[in-house]
Image: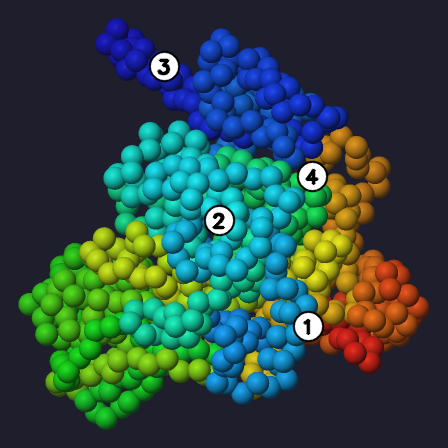
Amino acid sequence: MKLTSLFPLIFLIPLLASCAEKKQVYIVYFGEHKGDKALHEIEENHHSYLQSVKESEEDAKSSLLYSYKHSINGFAAELTPNEASRLEKLEEVVSVIKSHPRKYETHTTRSWEFVGLEEEETDGDIQKHDVDDRFRVGRKFLKKAKHGDGIIVGVLDSGVWPESKSFSDKGMGPVPESWKGICQTGVAFNSSHCNRKIIGARYYVKGYERYYGSFNVTANKDFLSPRDPDGHGSHTASTAVGRRVNGASALGGFAMGSASGGAPLARLAIYKACWAKPNVEKVDGNICLQEDMLAAIDDAIADGVHVISISIGTTEPLQYLQDGIAIGALHAAKRNIVVAASAGNSGPKPSTLSNPAPWIITVGASTLDRAFVGGLVLGNGYTIKTESITAFKMDKFAPLVYAANVVVPGIALNNSAQCLPNSLKPEQVNGKVVLCLRGAGSRIGKGIEVKRAGGVGMILGNSPANGNEIPSDSHFVPTAAVTPTVVEKILEYIKTDKKPIAFIKPGNTVYKNQPAPFMTGFSSRGPNVVDPNILKPDITAPGLNILAAWSGADSPSKVSVDQRVAEYNIYTGTSMSCPHVSGAIALLKAIHPKWSSAAIRSSLMTTAWMTNDEKKPIQDTNGLPANPFALGSGHFRPTKAADPGLVYDASYRAYLLYGCSVGLTNIDPTFKCPSKIPPGYNLNYPSIAIPNLNGTVTIKRTVTNVGNGNSTSTYLFSATPPLGVSVKAKPSVLSFNRIGQKKRFKIVVTARKDKMINVTEKGQYQFGWFSWTDRYHVVKSPIAVSLA
């Protein structure tokens, strides 16, 4: 061999060694703490583990980001792959998690009135709507819950805009004595920004800085403090617990009315762990590092919150021991803190949902009955109602073109109709209305491209995957958003008319728009790929076009060319549906302070709506009835959840036992998995999922009588089984003679193969329901079954 041929190898070997030893942030997780140790002792113990793999004590100290020492036992540190591997082999280490910024992201009013929680004006003026029985029940419910007073809700997000009227503390009493948190100061945020409403605020940036470098306010377009730079955190916080603000609206009058959180007198604790991507348009979303989030959850538990709301999720399914949110939520469940989290925005593709752990309430997104109705008129006389909240208007008809016909050379065929940046020919677009299709690129970005090319209007067409879901965005040109059926008619008109023209009418706010609710296309779907024995999501709530507080540091469209400032904004995502459920949880905690987190989940799930305001099954985006992989148990109904009749309760130890079935072992030193591990589907959950059913499966459940004043009651079983499956209960009658009494029963599910083979393919899920009913309550649970 020639000597010169060795040179590449000589230089390549150290290069490969350098890559292999490149440091990255890892979370080293030990589970629960062993015994009572002082905080400094716990941190010293974590240092000792680092010193065991590091070359020096100085290296060990400088590598440490966080020492989780309150409820969670672990640390986050910069390690090489070899160092991480050595720690992972230790018996006391439960898991080692490699951090990555692309694994987590944020999931980016009339809604409370829609679910029956409209409160009466405090100044004596009653709302103009008819005060029917639903609103009387809602007001009674709010009064009983004291509007959430005394409950502390921790919001894990991008911070808060404290000047918003939604976070006023006017008329609120002193901070609860149980509160142990702090008001952390920083850039544009001092102790005066906390009050009797925002009782605590913290921020977590160490993981973010290790990945992106030292924080720079200008480059990062963010504040090194709990202050919210882009509106997401303020929106979610005010949706959950914001004060009632009369006369709120977005973009000069859309959705005009009263903005209020579900629990307006609950206290708010801010945990900022999500940050703007440096030098990237904020419309692309925030980045959340799980080492930062885990530190936030650890502090929230120690601070004394009762509820944690997390509108954040993974971009890909993660096993429980690799998921920081799942780990943190389990420790919260031990302290009876209820955690609600968003399902994600990756629907309608199946098996895409985030936050599937059974100790988390996983929330999908559906619609409410408010629409922003405008109009589209074509030159052939075709007129259709559309949706729009843009402040820009057309004054006359204009020529109409299809984006795919006016693109510059070199645009891929599958992107030609998407109106992506710099894709349109100005000479063919100037002065015209452009039909753009959804799919690739942002909705706002498509309007910006039309404006750049000189267009005077945009028709934004849904793809079949989007169905009838119409998000309302603050576009920069007059815009009409339309469904796939309308897109087909417009394309046919453009194809057959020599000089097609169009006129876009401005939108107006319309209430009692039917049918409502229906499922959004973006809401992530089941089945649960982490453990298909747990049916997810759990429930759905309003997440489309939600009005709530906004950041004064960002525009309504979240793009740099937009110089508008909005106090309130309309936003869409499961990020918006999650805080609806968090607000409802706060009210339920106020009414039933001794209920476990599992009991509260059960009460919400078993009382949920399965029908829309037309008394028909809630529809999916394709117009067919939505199944439990889209809506879980149904659309949440807080007023009914206060009196569910029966609940499916589960303790922290029950979750540990369940964990044995999915490899979640050695979490708690006081608990050891039994030699015979029960199947995961026997966790006492308010729904049932059976993958690959072959023959008969017997599922065990226990219900607890929590009937409101009805200590003596008898419940009868009924079922609408999945197609080709029989569902029976043993016993089929449950009798109770006191509050708190528990009754066990078995659900026997049998595949009727003679019929099943004819109606479904192997692996395809079928859906059904079973209920326990007395004279006052219907305790309903969904079932999902697939054939082996």
Say whether disc 1 or disc 4 marks the residue closer to the N-terminus: 1
- Residue at coordinates 81% horizontally, 69% vertically from top-left? 707
Query: How far is the residue under mark 4 from the one under mark 3?
Result: 38 Å
Of tags 4 and 3, the one toward the viewer is 4
User: In the rendered image of this protein, does residue 689 appear above or below residue 213?
Assistant: below
Q: Which residue is labeled 2 in the image?
A: 195
- Residue 254 position, x and y percent, is 34, 74
Query: How far is the residue under mark 4 from the one under mark 2?
Result: 44 Å
- Residue 513 position, x and y percent, is 45, 83
State the SS at label 2. Answer: loop
Q: Is residue 438 visible?
A: yes
Query: How far is the residue under mark 1 from the one under mark 4?
Result: 36 Å
Tag 2: Cα neighbours inside 10 Å, few (<14), some, or many (≥20)? many
Viewed as shown, does residue 51 lie left or right of 9? Answer: right
Foreground residue among 24 and 778 = 778
User: In the rendered image of this protein, does residue 102 appear above or below residue 561?
Assistant: above
Which label sits on residue 663?
Answer: 4
Of tags 4 and 2, the one toward the viewer is 2
Proximity of marks 3 and 2: CB atoms separated by less than 8 Å? no
Q: Which residue is labeled 1 in the image?
A: 640
Amino acid identity at mark 2 = Asn
Amino acid identity at mark 3 = Ile
Foreground residue among 357 and 330 = 330
Of tags 1 and 4, the one toward the viewer is 1
- Residue at coordinates 42% horizontally, 46% vertically from top-left? 193
Say whether disc 4 or disc 3 marks the residue closer to the N-terminus: 3
User: In the rendered image of this protein, does residue 586 appear above or below residue 783?
Assistant: above
Query: How far is the residue under mark 1 from the one under mark 3?
Result: 67 Å
Say whether disc 4 or disc 2 marks the residue closer to the N-terminus: 2
